[in-house]
């Protein structure tokens, strides 16, 4: 399901910064929301650290990074502390936001089908419209650079 060209689905989730987050508060910003399966796992750590390392460049582009998983805020706090993540992680324990964004559903891992978080990313423009969606991220470690390349017109 492609969200490109559509208004970003509404969400209201608790963040690692201790407050609730909604799309409306980011009007005027470019919001990069990346969905990932689990804190402190190899692929998710590489992706988070990639966004961490590119954070100053993304901020210069009026960008805000939000990571979303179904992990608890306590788990998010440890992940942020362990890897020095400079952005907010949102907790979606019932997977409502992930479902609305196409980031939760059937996936195949090593030939086995299961339900779970689909590693994916959306970019929401300053007007609240989804301008880019990666429905499935293939390489977690290089994806943050791909997002930056898209935002700088190099992709």
Image: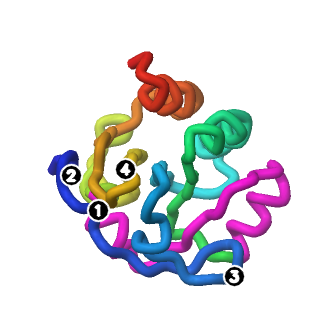
Q: Magenta stretch?
A: 74-101
Q: Would you name the residue on which mark 4 appears?
A: 125
Q: Please report the residue visible at 21 percent of the width from the left and 46 percent of the height from the top.
A: 4
Residue 79 placement (x, y as % from top left) = 74, 58
Give the mark, 4 or 1, whose residue is nearer the N terminus.
1
Find the distance from the CA under tag 4 to the CA under tag 1: 9 Å
Q: Please report the residue visible at 68 percent of the width from the left and 41 percent of the height from the top.
A: 55
Q: Secondary structure at mark 1?
A: loop
Give the mark, 4 or 3, whose residue is nearer the N terminus.
3
Q: Please report the residue visible at 50 percent of the width from the left and 52 percent of the height from the top.
A: 36
Find the distance from the CA under tag 2 to the CA under tag 3: 28 Å
Residue 42 visible in the snapshot: no
Q: Secondary structure at mark 3?
A: loop
Of badges 2 and 4, the one in the foreground is 4
Q: Quadrant of residue 15?
A: bottom right
Of badges 4 and 3, the one in the foreground is 4
Q: Secondary structure at mark 2?
A: loop
Q: Would you name the residue on which mark 3 appears?
A: 18
Find the distance from the CA under tag 4 to the CA under tag 3: 25 Å
Residue 8: give its label.
1
Q: Is residue 146 left or right of residue 131?
A: right
Question: Which colouring convention does the figure follow?
Answer: rainbow
Quadrant in the picture for the C terminus: top left
Q: Please report the residue visible at 37 percent of the width from the left and 48 percent of the height from the top.
A: 122
């Amino acid at each position: 399901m492609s969200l490109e060209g559509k208004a970003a689905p509404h969400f209201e989730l608790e963040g690692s910064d201790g407050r609730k987050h909604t799309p409306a508060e980011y009007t005027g910003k470019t919001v990069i929301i990346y969905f990932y399966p689990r804190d402190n796992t190899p692929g998710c750590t590489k992706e988070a650290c990639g966004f961490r390392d590119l954070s100053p460049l993304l901020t210069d582009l009026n960008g805000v990074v939000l990571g979303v998983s179904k992990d608890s805020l306590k788990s998010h706090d440890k992940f942020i502390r362990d890897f020095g993540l400079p952005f907010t992680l949102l907790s979606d324990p019932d997977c409502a936001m992930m479902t609305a964004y196409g980031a939760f559903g059937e996936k195949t891992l090593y030939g086995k089908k299961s339900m779970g978080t689909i590693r994916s990313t959306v970019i929401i423009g300053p007007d609240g419209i989804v301008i880019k969606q990666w429905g499935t991220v293939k390489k977690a470690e290089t994806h943050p650079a791909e997002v930056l390349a898209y935002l700088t017109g190099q992709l």
